[in-house]
Structures are given as structure tokens and as C-alpha cells.
Image (cartoon, rainbow, N blue to C red):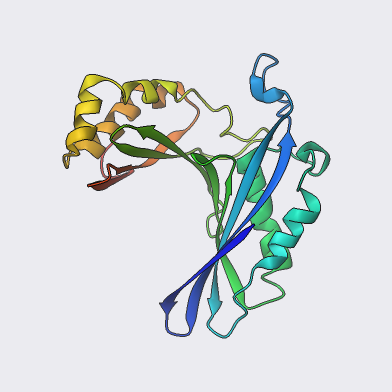
Amino acid sequence: MKATEEKCVAEGQITISQSFGFSASHELRQLPASHKCRRNHGHNYTVTASALARDDAPGDLSPLGDYLAATFDHRLLNEQVTFHPTSELLAAHLAEWFRDHMESAMPITLVEMVVSETATTSARCDSVTSEVTISKTFKTSHGDVTLVLGADGLNEVGFITDFGDLKPFGTYLQAPDADAGLRAAGPALVAHLAGWFVDNVEPEIRGRLVSVWVDSGTTTGLWERGDAS
């Protein structure tokens, strides 16, 4: 599977985004024995690379898709990489592979690499800063609430997979005041949800809230770190 999108960002330059899919399993063996993700389990992964290119460059990132198919498709990721095969460490690995194998071969520059294990969870590596963040979307009856979370750095396990329990936030979204806020989608809603997360969840996890995005169907809103804390 692959999908391609192009858009002009400056005269003589375009952004190319291309997605590729593969199916694979992994065992997150450095998690506690009681953790279900320690056992063998599989995902239908989607990998999306975005790159800046000259408008006369080939708008094709298929070498990445070829690498994914040959190296990871229908394989146990633990046998294919030397690191703990979490989505966030895989995103960092693929960003490095892209820079080593594609930027040297064509006039393009990687912007970001995103690895999605499910439709609601993904890891993103920023090519400029090498920062890795996780995006987690909570589905509600009134729309979607998406958290972007980061940490000060990755360790050998990968901070995202088990860096803390986000379930309290999902539970809070069903509470009467949060549910009413999502239904009304007032302008203060996003800041309220961010503040609740920072006060009640962030102290208990090994990470920090970067942004909150709410899409209620009729209203959208974005909170980014620095707007409130």
C-alpha cells in the first residue's frame, strides 16, 4: 500500500508525503512480564514520510517502501533490528535510514517520519530536531481528542510504549463536565482539557504534554505547550 501527496511550499520547492503499509509482529521483551505487549503480537503498520524537494525532483519515495517490504513485512521485528522494536524507536530508525540512503541519492530533505501501529496511535520523528513524539487519539461521541506527548529523550526501551497510563484521561472524557464541553465545543474547551491532563495525568507519567487537538465535527481547536501550563 502506498499513497502520495504533494503541495507547493515555496517557488521551486514542494513537500512530498508518501505512505506505505506493512504487517509485522513484535515482542516488547523489556516490558514487565505481566504486560501484554511483552508477548508476541502484530500490527498493520503505516509509515508516512514527508520530505522537501525541488519541483523538478522525482516525486517518488518508493525506495522507502521497498526497504519496508523487504526488511519488515510479515516478519518478527525483533529479528530484523538491534533495538527494542517500539514504534517510536522504529520511527527514529527509519528517519536515519532515509537520511543515509535517500537524501544522498536525490535532491530531497526529510521533514518527518511517522509510524502508526493503529488508526489512533502513532509515533513521529522530527528530522530537524530528532525529537520523537507520540500521537494518541481518543474517540468520543462528540468528536476526536488527540494528544501529542513527548519526553526529554529516548532510552533503549523507547519512552512511549510504557511511559505511563493515559486511561484516566480517556475516563475523564466521559465525565459529565468534559462530555458537556465536547458537546458544546466552546473556545475554552481545549485549554480546559490540556489543563486537566497537566494537573492529573502528567505528574504520573514519564513524559510531557506537547499539544491537544479537538475536532468536534463542527469546531476545531488546538492547544500547544506554552499557551498554558
44, 116: nearer the viewer: 44
Picture quarter with the N terminus: bottom right
Q: Position of residue 94 (x, y in %)?
A: 67, 54
Picture quarter with the C terminus: top left
Name the image quarter holding residue 34: top right
Instruction: Check the image and report above or below for 59 versus 101.
Output: below
Furthest residue in direction top, as rendered: 34
Q: Is residue 192 left or right of residue 151?
A: left
Instruction: Check the image and report above or below for 48 versus 196.
Output: below
Q: Residue at x 64, y 36 (%)?
A: 155
Q: Residue at x 60, y 42 (%)?
A: 88
Q: Position of residue 93 (x, y in %)?
A: 68, 50
Instruction: Check the image and report above or below for 41 versus 125.
Output: above
20, 89: nearer the viewer: 20
19, 160: nearer the viewer: 19
Furthest residue in direction right, as rendered: 79
Q: Is residue 212 left or right of residue 158?
A: left
94, 145: nearer the viewer: 145
Q: Position of residue 121 (x, y in %)?
A: 51, 39
Taking the image as drawn, is residue 84 in sight?
A: no
Q: Residue at x 69, y 62 (%)?
A: 64
The number of callouts visible is: 0
Instruction: Check the image and report above or below for 127 versus 86.
Output: below
Q: Is residue 47 left or right of residue 184?
A: right
Taking the image as drawn, is residue 37 in sight?
A: yes
Q: Residue at x 53, y 43 (%)?
A: 122
Q: Position of residue 212 (x, y in %)?
A: 34, 41
Name the image quarter holding residue 17: bottom right
